[in-house]
Structure formats: C-alpha cells, structure tokens
Amino acid sequence: MQNNYTAPSVEDLKSPKRQLFAVRSLALEQNFLYGKDKGRVGDEDTSPSRYGELLSTGSQIRGSAHLQLAQQTLMGLVDPDTQRGQRGAWLLRPFHESLLWYDARKASPSRHDWSVRKVYMRGSGITLARMLADAGNVMVRPHGLRAVDAIQQALKTPSPLAKISEQLEAALPRQHFAMVESDEKNAWEQARDSRLRDLETQVCLHADGVMGQGSASGPEKLWQLRTALALALAIHVLKTAWSITQTPAADRFLLLSFGDDARAQDPVRQQSEDSFRRARIRLAEATVSTLGRRMRELGLQGHKEWEGDFEMRKGSVADALQDVSHQLRRMTHPSVEENYLTLARTAVENANYGRSEDGFRVLFESIGLIAGTRYRYLTATPDLLGALVGALSTRMPMSSREFFAAVRDEWGFVINQEAAAHTSLAGQLDGAALERNARRAERMMSEAGLALGLSDRTTVVGERAAWSGREVRV
C-alpha cells in the first residue's frame, strides 16, 4: 500500500513504517502523540499532543460527533493476537488501508513519547510483498499480480471507518515519510534469493487462491491471507531446518489433532505433541549447525576478532562466550566439525540465536495452530481450516480424502491414516485412531460451512465460488 501496490526499484522503495498516531490514539486509548507540541490542530490552543489526549479518551473535538462510538468500533477490530507488551505493537485486523499502521515503541519505559521504529516487524513482510508484486519466477508471477490486485480492491472498499481515519489524520500538521533503512532494502532484494523459490511459489499460489474466492467477503479474504502468509513463512523455516539437519523423509510432518478426549486417552494428541516438540528441536539443531558452519568459514578467512560477534542473552554467563571467542582465536582452522559444533552449542545457549525457533512458535500461535498449556499440541481452528481451503480454492471442490492429501503435500500436515502411511507414525498409531481424527476434522469443517457431507463416507470440501468467471458447484 505504501508503494501504490506496485514493485518499485530498490532506489524508489518507500518504507512501510506508517504512524497513524491519531487513529491509534482513538482506537487503543493511548496518547501516541504525547510530547509532540510543534504545530497546531484545528485552532491555536490545540497541539498534536493535546489532540492525542482528547482522542485517547474519546472526548469530543470541535466539529466532531460520536467519537466514542467510533472508538468502541475500532477497539472491536483490535487483533487479540497482537496484544502483547506495549500498545505500540497492537494492530487492527486487516480491514481497510486507512487503518494499517506499523509497530511503534517508546524510547524507554520511563518515557511517554512514541516513535515508529524497526522493532517487532523486521524484513519478512517486505520480502513477501515483493514476492507477490514482482515474483522472480515467471510461472507464478501472474498469480502474485492477481492477488495484489484483489488485495488492493479489498483494502480500498468504501467504509465509514476509512473516512474517520482520513479526517483524524488530515487534521495533524504535515508528516514526512519515514526514511528507508538499509535492511529494508536488503529485505526487498532478499526476495530474489534462489533459496526462497519454493516459498515464493507457495506465497503467490496461496495468496491468489485466497483472494480469488468468489463468495468470501473482503475482510474474510484479508484475514485468510494473513493466516496463509504466516503459515507459508513458518513452514518454510521448518522445511529449511529439516533440510539442514538431514531429517529423514518419514519424520518430515506435523500431526494435527482434532480430538476432545482426555490427554491420557488420546494417542493422536500425544503424537501431535511429539511432532511439535521434534520440530522445535530440529530448528534448534539447524541453528547450531548453521552457526558452526559459519564459524568454520570465518576461521578459514582468517577472522581473528571474535569477541564482538556474539550478543549475550539476558541472564547468560559472559565467561562462556568469552571462552568461545578465546577458543576460536586459538584454534587452527579448519578444525574437525565436532569442535565447531561444540562451540556453536555453547554460543546458542548464551547468545541471542533463538529468533527462528521463537518466530516459528509465535507464527503458529497467531494462526491458531497450537493448543494446550503444559502439554502443547497442534490442531486447527475453523479460521485456520478456512484459510487452508481458501489457499487451495483453485482446486476445489474436492473430497475430504483429496483435501487431507493436499494439506499433507502443501504444508506437511497429517490428519488421516492415508497421509500418515509413509511417515514414522505408521508404526506408532493405529489406523482407527487416525480415522476418528479425520472424521472430527470433517465435522468441524462441515459445521464451519467449509464442507458438505454427502453420505456417511463422502464429504466434499469447498464452497460455491466464482473462479475466473466460472461457477464451480459443490
């Protein structure tokens, strides 16, 4: 949206760091304009800071009406999955382009002024945006461009809330665009990395599937798009870890459990817990392996100053990282692989190398893939199932058996006995348990309007949708 739904050159790229501090103040009951005293809003007595204070309390401003009602409506659009930490990280559900903003943060806990900085959102969104708007693979580029056109149409659908947002922001003194930072440019260029070709293909095809549905509303498509993109990124990270750690093909899966039995009597849930646990272990192992390989490469290049290369994690032991640096400096390169891996494990335990594993977990949590508290397992909410159906909409309708097979191929999810046949689950779960799991998944999809049961043995997945001007009947 910041770049007019096109793919500019890296020199012309505009930063996604968008403030919308007036709308934020109203929607989140927090004065994001605190301390901004330059300029005036509406009259000589109202500074931007005072304006933000009035908005945060829903107070009437000269010429306004029903601001409290607008505030209550906007508060209802806050995405609960973003309500962690400072309110600057809270986002509205994707609804209209006038309500899209970027993370903001206080300079320090003791200060009350806010700024939009590179904090929580890093480069992934910029990379995914270019994949859609300017795919390197000419075979999937039309899918990406079609998805972008549909995204633009959905985000520009007329809305009374859009008018409120535009009026509130227009009252502020003129604001300048945030400067593009070097890592934003790097994230844009990263979309051309050959290692991301599979991710690009999945992003373009699934976004086109979601946004091309004929009977879904604009907001529903946008919500499904958010889920599809988060899922594509998380699964890409996991597949990369599987590749780096040379995980056997039989172990490259995630088991989704749809049971409501007690944990002790639910073997599918127990195996689902194990599949999630092993996925996180693979991510940690991949981090150690990658770090060890990088240590070896730098050592061969004659790297000497290792002390500044590790950012110590809070609560870790500084001596441990100093010892790693000392050993790397004294080591004769190349050394045996195990020496690098040992040092890499020590570094991972004491430095900040958990971002890939944490990001993977947070993405799964945000789209409703993780359930449970002490014993966490993988499942799918009706919203997530809707996104899966939407991503595959160009291939709909299909039987539930075909759908479960497609879900296994696209994302590695195992739901029924047939999908588990060539995995290590084959010797750990009996087929009856997996088939009960599949029936429960079918029932959930039927209740959510995503599938239609034609008989005791036949369930058809899909919806009445117009695709490329053609009616598809379920």
Image (cartoon, rainbow, N blue to C red):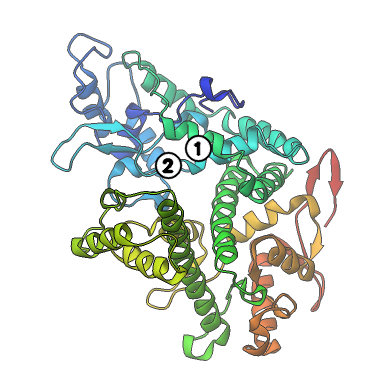
Circles 1 and 2, Cβ within 8 Å, touching? The answer is yes
Mark 2 crowdedness (10 Å alpha carbons): few <14, some 14-19, many ≥20: few
Percent x, y of residue 142: 75, 35
Left or right side of 241 for 426:
right
Mark 1: few, some, or many residues within 10 Å (few <14, many ≥20)? Answer: some
Q: Which of 454 and 232 is in front in this view?
A: 232
Q: In which quarter of the image is residue 169?
A: top left
Residue under the image location 34 percent in, 62 percent down: 331
Q: How many labels does the image show?
A: 2
**Of 244 and 256, the residue lying toward us:** 244
Farthest residue in the top direction? 44
Question: Which of the two residues, 319 or 170, is positioned nearer the viewer here?
Answer: 319
**Left or right of 47 on screen, residue 324:** right
Q: Where is residue 434 in the image (x, y as percent from the top left)?
A: 66, 82
State the residue position of label 1: 187
Alpha carbon separation for disc pair 1 and 2:
9 Å
Residue 460 in the image, given as x and y percentages of width and height: 79, 65
User: Dot 2: what SS?
Assistant: loop
Identify residue type, mark 2.
Arg
Instruction: Identify the residue at horizontal 63%, vertical 88% (top origin).
Output: 429
